[in-house]
Amino acid sequence: MDKGQLAVDNFKTGLNCAQAVVLAFQDELKLDPLTLKKLSISFGGGLGRQRLTCGAVSGMCMVLGTVLSDGVDKLYIYDIIQKACKEFKEQVGSVICAELLDGETAKSTNPKPEDRTTEYYKKRPCAELCRLAAEITQKYLGLNK
């Protein structure tokens, strides 16, 4: 299954960027959709729409940490997270939401998200950032497309 496309599809249903990536890996996480949505909702928009770390990156890290970590060995999982984030950054230039968004959108920290319209999707790279984060996650999990 192509997790990248699944993350894009999830985002286009109205999920935030973190949720879109996390829910793409529901089978691997072995948790119900509502629990996954609740765990990841606050990471959207760069941590509660503060434009900090990209929510898609946060979702990627949540999945990798949950699936690959034993919950104790920080060195192992930090190494993987740093490599995955470096790969993301090399492809799009940053892991910071505000840097990935241009113009007024990047400055807005209003907690109310914009309506998901055709114009919204045209001006935002978020769906493709979800795709990239999910593809990198899929790679590190060793899942075939």
Image (spheres, helix red, strand yellow):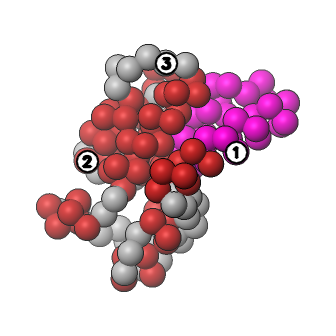
Name above or below for residue 30 compared with residue 22: above
Q: Is residue 144 left or right of residue 15?
A: right
Q: How many labels does the image show?
A: 3
In terms of secondary structure, where does tag 2 sit? helix
Find the distance from the CA under tag 3 to the CA under tag 1: 19 Å
In terms of secondary structure, where does tag 3 sit? loop
Amino acid on which the number 1 mark rests in the picture: Gln
Q: In this view, does 35 lie to the left or right of 11?
A: right
Q: What stretch is highlighted in magenta?
A: 57-85
Number of the front mark, 3 or 2: 3
Number of the front mark, 2 or 1: 1
Extreme residue toward the left, this view: 118
On-image quarter of the N terminus:
top left
Secondary structure mainly formed by the magenta segment:
helix
Q: Which residue shows up at 44% across the image and 34% down it?
A: 135
Percent x, y of residue 73: 85, 30
Q: Which residue shows up at 53% across the image and 33% down it?
A: 137
Q: Is residue 71 left or right of residue 132?
A: right
Which residue matches tag 1? 82
Q: Which residue shows up at 55% across the image and 54% down it?
A: 89
**Which mark sits nearer the N-terminus, 3 or 2?**
2
Percent x, y of residue 71: 79, 30
**In front of the other: 113 or 131:** 131
